Image (cartoon, rainbow, N blue to C red):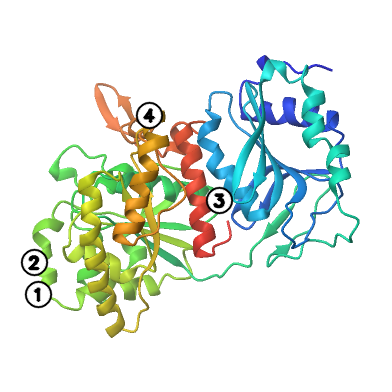
Amino acid sequence: MKFDPKLCRNESEVESKLIVQYLLPTLGYDASKWHQEVAFGSIRLDFLALTSPIFSSNRDSAPKTCVVIEAKHPNQNLNFHVRRLTRYLTKLQVMYGVLTNGKDFRIYELMGDRLDLTFQCQGSEITDKIEKISDIIGRAKLAGLETNKSIPLINLPIQVDVIDPASKSISLLTPASKIMKTIAIYHNKGGVGKTTTTINLAAAMSRKGLKVLIIDLDSQANTTYAAGLMKFDTEEDDTLKDSNIYNVVFYPKSNYIPEIALKGSFTYPEVDVIPAHINLIWQEANLIDKESSKLQLVKKLELVKDNYDLVLIDTPPSLNLYAKIALIACDYLIIPSDLKPFANEGLRNVKNFIEEIDEFRGFISRSPINILGVLPSKILTNANYIKATLPKQEKVVQDRYGFPVLETRIFQREDLSRAIDNFVMEGDRQIPDPKSIFDFKPDSMSAAEFEELANEILEKIGLRS
């Protein structure tokens, strides 16, 4: 049997025609030795090929002799998925990983905390080189590497669900707290990708079955627009000016979240959104005169803690009252940054601001903000920049400003801007119809990056996807 990469037009066909129909049986993995859609907490594997029907729990230093196989769309560049595969293999201590999009086929080996590229060929060469591939990751080869000691069922701190032989899936899920998690997306510099992060992270989480609420606290209302809530043409038709986040934080005994929240049309499943409005600029003076306004969002979120799994708060690029309200209310913080000099210098302001907020949180018996990390966003895709400059910029963030850096990187791609700028025509009218990247171009690299970000955040905050 020969494999023809021309048969693979999308990711699903890479999975079915290359991996399921050709690769796994040719390498000696029968139906009891491989599983599809394997979940280890927030980690989701496309395929896991084993030398025995169960996953080893040996805790010694040697990686487990099995193979993680990740399939990508034929148009995707595999270079952008190596970091995620590295995280999978190091987290699970698995010896080998395969990345393929049908056109490109790679085998990586775990060496300590890094991956080495052991083998690479074009999709058209897979059949001719299958013996070489089998000599690296074939079941007979890996079985020979197994030790003779007993291999009990996985004994990691995770819950094992039943393996369904019919569906070929394993679900190994972390025990999840039902407590609602609130994440602020904040940087005091504008133009670093806060809105893009909020909208697409919300969509990614919603697609995983989580109930998500977005709160827009920025008077520019970019997130409100990107959520599809600004489709009016004139001030007279403005339905948001009397029902937005200002009402939530100004009135203590009315305007509760269920009364103000709207359904965003930017993604499916739908996400609830508390909109912002340009009037927030002058309305801030009213809130400053009302000290209790700092705590109204905390109190009203407490009332809906059973309604949502995740709350994402988009913030203004400033140190104003709205930013304070967001950081007082959140449990966690993501700091998007393009890592350029001004953005990095702004991190000093962010750090001082967090210290100020944490002092106030202490007075109201709230624990300090849990900083998830700086998210590299709007990053250039130039290969030389990614290899030489980007790691240095990330190191500056850690060494000079003391912030952790998230593993995921969000690159500057046309698809992301086109998704938010999407529109439909109604007669001679151009109607804004913004979409998340998952609804606009689900097979894009940007969608893969936000999927990776969602998985990383889920792992850090302890929510089960």
Q: Is residue 53 above or below residue 266?
A: below
Measure the alpha-carbon separation of dots 4 and 3. Answer: 31 Å
Task: Return the disc, 4 or 2, that comes first in the chain's sequence.
Answer: 2
Residue 163 x %, y %: 80, 54
- Residue 63, numbered circle: none
Q: Sort mark 4 into few (<14), some (14-19) or many (20+) by Cα contacts within 10 Å.
A: few
User: Given the image, on which type of amino acid does mark 2 rest?
Assistant: Ala
SS at mark 3 in the image: loop
User: Given the image, on which type of amino acid does mark 3 rest?
Assistant: Lys
- Residue 285, numbered circle: 2
Badge nearest the viewer, 4 or 2: 4
Measure the alpha-carbon separation of dots 2 and 1. Answer: 6 Å
Residue 129 x %, y %: 77, 20
Residue 157 x %, y %: 68, 67
Do the residues under discs 4 and 1 have CB atoms within 8 angstroms?
no
Badge nearest the viewer, 4 or 3: 4
Q: Which residue lies under the disc numbered 3?
A: 208
Give the tally of numbered discs: 4
| Nearest the eye: 123 or 253 | 123
Picture residue at 47% right of the left edge, 48% below the top? 453
Do the residues under discs 2 and 1 have CB atoms within 8 angstroms?
yes
| Nearest the eye: 325 or 292 | 325
Task: Return the disc, 3 or 1, that comes first in the chain's sequence.
Answer: 3
Task: Return the disc, 4 or 3, that comes first in the chain's sequence.
Answer: 3
Q: Which residue lies under the disc numbered 4?
A: 382
Q: Quarter-wise, where is residue 244 in the image?
A: bottom left
